[in-house]
Image (spheres, rainbow, N blue to C red):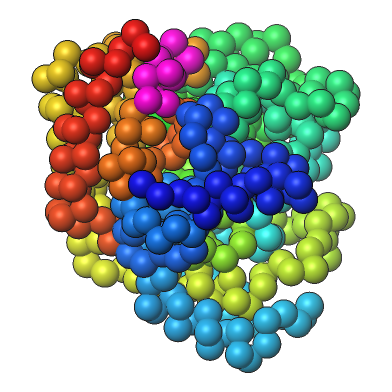
Amino acid sequence: MDITKSKKLFSRAKEVIPGGVNSPVRAFKSVGGVPRFLSRGRGAYIWDADDNRYIDYMMSWGPLILGHAHPKVVEAVREAASAGTSFGASTAGEIELAEMVIDRFLAVEMLRLVSSGTEAAMTAIRLARAVTGRELVVKFDGCYHGHSNGLLVKAGSGLATQGLPGSAGVPESAARGTISLPYNDLEAVWKTFDKRGEDIAGIIVEPAAANMGVVPPVEGFLNGLRMAAEKDGAVLIFDEVISGFRVARGGACELYNIRPDLVCFGKILGGGMPIGAVGGKREIMERLAPAGNVYQAGTLSGNPVSVAAGIATLRELETPGFYERLNNTTKKLALGLEEILTEAEIRVVINRLTGLLTVFFGEGEISDYQLVQNCDMDRYARFFRGMLDEGVYLPPSGYEAWFLSSAHNDDEIERTLKAAGNVVEELTTNEYE
Ligand SMILES: *Cc1c(COP(=O)(O)O)cnc(C)c1O
């Protein structure tokens, strides 16, 4: 595979962009090899600067549930952009998008649009602290809620991939405001609430974790969080930046039938354009300025182009059978990979939800970050490089979810499985290299 242009671009980028990338995982540090510079995408496919084509399972890390350059989304963006890309004043589209989210999420009575998932989580935490008058936040190991100070404690993929314990530059005081507990461990939650319940402002959780690879909640976990939060008057925040509109029309809230107090959104909500949002109970949301005294603002918040892409995307998700089809495709890929790898006597566990899966090279039930870290990430790196050579672009880290879209059809799944079959031979023969 000729990757001359990507190589050249990467060296040029390293001169002017820290690490050559604008978000760490893009640098291929944990999987090795040359990061590809991409030039275009269509449906389930992407092309790099040397015009090599790949089946894409990264899909911009989640937003592209309809595939790359979906005609309806592109048209909506074109139309919105030609009417003005930003005003700094309100537009009707913002109301429409808020109404669409409220229609899909019982827990959401009001919505505030921001520009990223990071801001959404930051705002949710600020609200939780404001309504409770408390400071402490409970999160879970391996869950990622953006890169704000207090939430970078044991924050999953990006950090795990870099091998960093947290981040330099985060004041101890900010990290002290966060307690991180093992995911799926209700006992740890109850113990923490027994000791510190009256100091806890809120619990923030990925209700279907996908930033340490896909780790679904075990039965009773989310309900337990609901009860713990209620008992001591803490705010329960579901971070649905990935799971929202993906694992079901109404996200994990619908899938597991739980009603949190606040929900964070991003990714799919912007259809591939920058966006984030926080929504929830009216009495909490009305604390936000200018209705209330919790300050939050943004020059590009509710950007008309992002909003148009979001509306077009959510509309498309209403196609009858959309989620059933996405789930079938995901299942077909997961079962196919499992069969190929198991037949080659490679230990593998595949966790999946609708439109999301992770291939873990390990065994047993993988239900928390510790268990994820026990998996063979070197083997994932070899698998990744092999698949890339075969024209299949997996997420460049074993700590990430693979993202599927409605543009992934039987043909793409079959090609992917064929590629995996070829790579498996190398995986087993080169094992001790
Ligand atoms: C991606 C992500 C974020 C951060 O969103 P950005 O738009 O990258 O700031 C927050 N929470 C979760 C669960 C995410 O997956």
- Taking the magenta stretch, the answer to whether it contains residue 61 is no
Q: Nearer the viewer, residue 138 or 340?
A: 340
Q: Nearer the viewer, residue 232 or 403?
A: 403
Is 353 on the left or on the right of 271, as rendered? Answer: left
Q: Which residues are drawn in magenta?
A: 372-382
Judge whether residue 291 can be spotted in this image: no
**Percent from the top left, x then y, of residue 300?**
74, 69
Q: Quadrant of ligand 1?
A: top right
**Percent from the top left, x then y, of residue 151?**
70, 32
* Magenta: main secondary structure: helix
- Taking the magenta stretch, the answer to whether it contains residue 378 is yes
User: Which residue is found at the position 57% from the left and 73% from the top?
Assistant: 307
Q: Nearer the viewer, residue 160 or 259?
A: 160
User: Which residue is found at the position 63% from the left and 20% from the top?
Assistant: 163
Is 245 on the left or on the right of 133, as rendered? Answer: left
User: Which quadrant would residue 392 be assigned to in this image?
Assistant: top left
Is 14 on the left or on the right of 1, as rendered? Answer: right
